[in-house]
Image: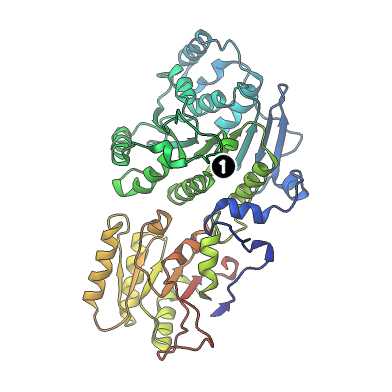
Amino acid sequence: IRYVKSGLRHPRHQLHNGSRDDSFLSTISESTRSSDSTSTEEKQSRDSKITVLDGSQIEVFSESPERDPRAQYDVLKDFRALLSKYGAEASEQMAQVLRQNGFDKPLETQRRAVPLVMSAFTDEQKRFITIQGAPQCGKTSALVLGILGEAGPELPGLRAVVLSTCATGEFKKYFDMCAGAGPLRLECFEGVQRRVCFEGLAPDPDSAIAGVDPLEDLQRLSTALATGAPAMVFGHPTRVLPLLREAPSWGVGLGNVQVLALDDAEETIRVGLMDEVCEVCTILRHFSRHRLRHIILSQFLSHEAKSMIRCLRNSLLRQQNLFGIRAHRTQARAKSVNHYYAVAPRTRWPAMLAALHHALSLPSGIIFDDASPEARAQARTALRAHGVTASVWNALQEQGSGARAAARDGANAAPRGPSFHLMPSDLVVLRVDLPQVRCVLHFEVPRRELSVYGLRLLCLEQTEPKKGGGRKAGGTSARPLSVLFVEGEGGV
């Protein structure tokens, strides 16, 4: 078992005075290293950069780019190719509908962007695509057409989430234009357009959802997905986020979501909604069974916006930040925690935990285990066999007050000492208010989602550091504990 010193590894991660404790914007301002958007590191992670004839720019990034830089991406030469997998009749119908609405042939941006959007559903390596272009160049329509052309009935339920601050109905207009051409359904949760604004008054993001009933939104989405047809959600970040937080507890599956798109990223950054975007991303990455692909649409990005998008991309693709893309709250909590890790085969973790518990008198805590329910049940049985009181929480069914009830039940069932509760990370990802404990144990951290480690720490009690340190009578440190169990040191 080894001790890991908590704290920040570089002074640039420190917050400046006045920064928000839990702000993605603060993270960006601290982490911008260079104004050069074509740094060597970025070039190495970028598969391709395409400059379209109309001036638009398209960049494609992946976790481990192996693409031959001389290779060419597909080009959409004719709208008939959009629905080619559904047969000649569907292809001709799509082309005819688009022709009736003024699209005789693909625009330059559409020619390049539509095949890339379609490939996001089939190629897990294309993890992050940015499309910058002037207004009316065809970015939004390319996104709609690409999703329509590829998201078929092979996977049921929610397939894509598109976030946008736009309330003009442009996205829905393009979708309705081709309604019926494919099996995909659209559910819109747009923001309310504020008709009156005052110069010098900062925009209020919450005004976009004034008068909106979240329960009604949830019921509508649940009903729409009950048929099993493929579907897509389009909406304002402040309206979609509470919808996704509650979706798992309503039985709305997020496991087949493959694409998260952000339309008009520059405006989203300007009104301060990147925190909400990042939280939506965290939820989808956690619950989806697929590697989430990200598509960013915008007018030509300012220097500040480029820095934010670059930081977002690096956090998602390289997982450079253990504490996630909304880092400062979890970093602050981590500094007040003693971190340890243990390396052993999974079958030995219960015995090792029992030995630690008996030797150090560990306080009651939560054991996070994102393996299967069967694996959690086996861990509970093994812990009880070693004399450790343990229970399993069915997290999504015990969301909110139910989680507290489970904690009380566990305490009542074991009044003679500390107890541990095994649960997946679902509730911390959904930001549910969990009971505060002094000990968090991690039975591994998902390799594709390392930032869950930081979110789990939010269950720990916040304690004021005492001068002189010292230890409690029971033998454990006065600081909260975090113990990570892994099967190999490569996971630490």
Residue 247, given in percent of the width and then of the height, sits at 34, 45
Q: Is residue 190 above or below residue 460?
A: above
Residue 66, given in percent of the width and then of the height, sits at 69, 44
Residue 111, given in percent of the width and then of the height, sits at 63, 22
Element class at badge 1 = loop
- Residue carrying label 1: 124
Residue in view at x 45 percent, y 68 percent: 443
Q: Please tell me how many numbered marks the rendered image carries.
A: 1
Q: Is residue 380 above or below residue 115?
A: below
Residue 83, given in percent of the width and then of the height, sits at 50, 20
Mark 1: give few (<14), some (14-19) or many (20+) Cα within 10 Å. Answer: some
| Quarter residue 219 falls in | top left
Q: Residue furthest bottom?
A: 473
The three-letter code of the residue at mark 1 reads Glu
| Quarter residue 297 falls in | top right
Residue in view at x 40 percent, y 40 percent: 239
- Is residue 297 shown to the viewer in this render? yes
**Residue 319 or residue 11, whichever sits in front:** 11
Quadrant location of the C terminus? bottom right
**Residue 114 or residue 298, whichever sits in front:** 298
| Quarter residue 438 falls in | bottom left
Going by the image, does 409 lie left or right of 480? left
- Is residue 66 shown to the viewer in this render? no
Q: How is the image coloured?
A: rainbow
Q: Is residue 262 above or below residue 310?
A: above
